[in-house]
């Protein structure tokens, strides 16, 4: 493989899993189309803020070993869960 053919080969391998019939999952919000993952990320952060408020009120927050990591991973978990449920990826995996 030549040096010139290497980038083309990398692009072809990277695009091999892409489906020509696939579309990006978007939702119309106020007339503009937003990607579902962006909305899921915002909702995941909001869910984590609500979780933190509950933890502060119950005193659990003081007992967390590394609160920053706990809240970071909670936000990621909420976001991925919301995205998977909304986009139907959970249903496709069965």
Image: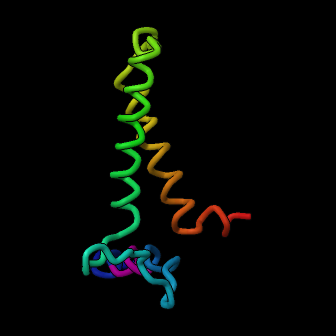
The quadrant of the picture occupied by the N terminus is bottom left
Q: Main secondary structure of the magenta part?
A: helix
From what the image shows, is residue 86 above or below residue 53?
below
Give the residue drawn at x 57%, y 60%.
85
Q: Residue 68, percent across and down?
A: 34, 24
Give the residue drawn at x 41%, y 17%.
57
Q: Residue 65, percent across and down?
A: 44, 12
The residue lying toward the viewer, choosing from 27 and 17, is 27
- The outermost residue toward the front is 57
The quadrant of the picture occupied by the C terminus is bottom right
The residue lying toward the viewer, choosing from 72 and 2, is 72
The residue lying toward the viewer, choosing from 86 and 37, is 86
Question: Which quadrant of the figure has residue 35?
Answer: bottom left
Magenta highlight on residue 51: no
Question: Which quadrant of the figure has residue 4?
Answer: bottom left
Give the residue drawn at x 40%, y 66%.
36
Q: Residue 75, percent across and down?
A: 41, 40
Give the residue drawn at x 35%, y 75%.
6
Q: How is the image coloured?
A: rainbow
**Which span of residues is magenta-colored?**
8-12
The residue lying toward the viewer, choosing from 60 and 41, is 60
């Amino acid at each position: 493989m030549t040096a010139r053919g290497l980038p083309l080969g990398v692009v072809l391998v990277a695009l091999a899993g892409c489906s020509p019939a696939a579309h990006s999952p978007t939702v119309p919000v106020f007339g503009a189309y937003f990607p579902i993952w962006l909305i899921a990320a915002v909702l995941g952060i909001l869910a984590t803020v609500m979780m933190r408020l509950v933890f502060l009120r119950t005193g659990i927050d003081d007992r967390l070993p590394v609160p920053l990591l706990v809240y970071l991973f909670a936000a990621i978990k909420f976001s991925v869960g919301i995205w998977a449920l909304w986009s139907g990826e959970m249903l496709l995996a069965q």
